[in-house]
Amino acid sequence: MDIIGGPASQLLAGRVSKALESNLLVSEFKKFPDGELYTRILDDFAGDNVTIIQSTVTDSDFIALLQLIDACGEASRINVVIPYMGYARQDKQFKKGEPISARVMARAIKADYVFTVNIHTESILDYFDAKAVNLDATPVIGKYIKNMEFKDPLIVAPDDGAIALARNAAKDLGIDYDYLEKTRLSGESVTIQPKNINVNGRDVIIIDDIISTGGTIAETISLLRMQGAHEVFAACVHPVLSNNAILKLFKAGVKGIIATDTIDKGVGVVSVAPVIASAIGNV
Ligand code: R5P
């Protein structure tokens, strides 16, 4: 199998090709003076089974992915791995007149197989023409957490939408997990606290699929610290970390950030390469 790394996923593509001992193709990506993207696969490829790995963090990343798919047009099978799929949060029409952006993106991707990693909502997979499979990075995050030194650790989801992430990360590790629940006390006041477990004196690892602006996690860190948590860590699959997100997390008192390499950022301490390698090695 030939592996093609897109511009946003060079490190991950390298790691996947190492894990599978497969051929890694070098491509070039540059911009024309008017800003249009030029993409070219430089290495020869056999033209049979190719896997393109490219996160679509920016619009330009998405264009690069489409160009790479087109450049592989003669391959007998094209697998596309989108470790982080941008626009997935617009998975429905929230207001009249809006597009379903996740559907727009999915429909444009023509391949035999598509793999995503902890996509924001699994229902997006139905929008791909190809057979689409969503991979789960939370067990590798859990293993990483297991090997760190913590005081009585507890994994916490910032809301009920992230419970499955917390449960899967904690699974088989003997680590407790919980989620934050908002309870309305009156018209003006609400309490937000872990549903079942007292955090007092414990190290807490907050886990979410995406940290984007950092707002959700920064607020959660402040709440947990007010409730007596010892150290608070932030974990996520996709470190979008737009703008000043990292500063916000540290300002809120985060002890450390644990993220995967679906987006190539300095906080990516856990690799999803084994998860992707095992999935594409089996199709
Ligand atoms: C929302 O549905 C996601 O699961 C994350 O909670 C959200 O994307 C985090 O965004 P931010 O870091 O901007 O608060």
Image (cartoon, grey):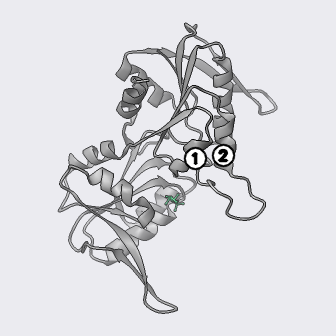
- Tell whether 88 sits left or right of 283: right
Question: Looking at the picture, does residue 105 appear above or below residue 252?
Answer: above
Q: Which mark is residue 124?
A: 1
* Residue drawn 60% across the image and 45% down it: 86
- Tell whether 34 sits left or right of 251: right
Mark 1 vs ligand 1: CB under 8 Å? no
- Residue 1 in the image: x percent, y percent? 46, 15
Instruction: Give yes or no for contact between labels 2 and 1 (Cβ–Cβ under 8 Å).
Output: yes
Residue toward you, 42 or 196? 196
Q: Amino acid at mark 1?
A: Ile
Q: Is residue 159 visible?
A: no
- Tell whether 270 sits left or right of 216: left
Disc 1, SS: helix
Q: Amino acid at mark 2?
A: Arg
- Residue 133 in the image: x percent, y percent? 48, 37
Question: Looking at the picture, does residue 134 appear above or below residue 3?
Answer: below
- Residue 95 in the image: x percent, y percent? 72, 65
The quarter of the displayed image where residue 207 is located: bottom left
Q: CA distance from mark 2 to mark 1?
A: 7 Å
Q: Residue furthest right?
A: 34
- Badge 1 density bin: few <14, some 14–19, many ≥20, Cα 10 Å: many
* Residue drawn 58% across the image and 14% down it: 76
Question: Which residue is disc 2 drawn over?
Answer: 103
- Residue 20 in the image: x percent, y percent? 37, 20
* Residue drawn 31% across the image and 42% down it: 140
* Residue drawn 27% across the image and 76% down it: 228
Q: Which mark is residue 24?
A: none
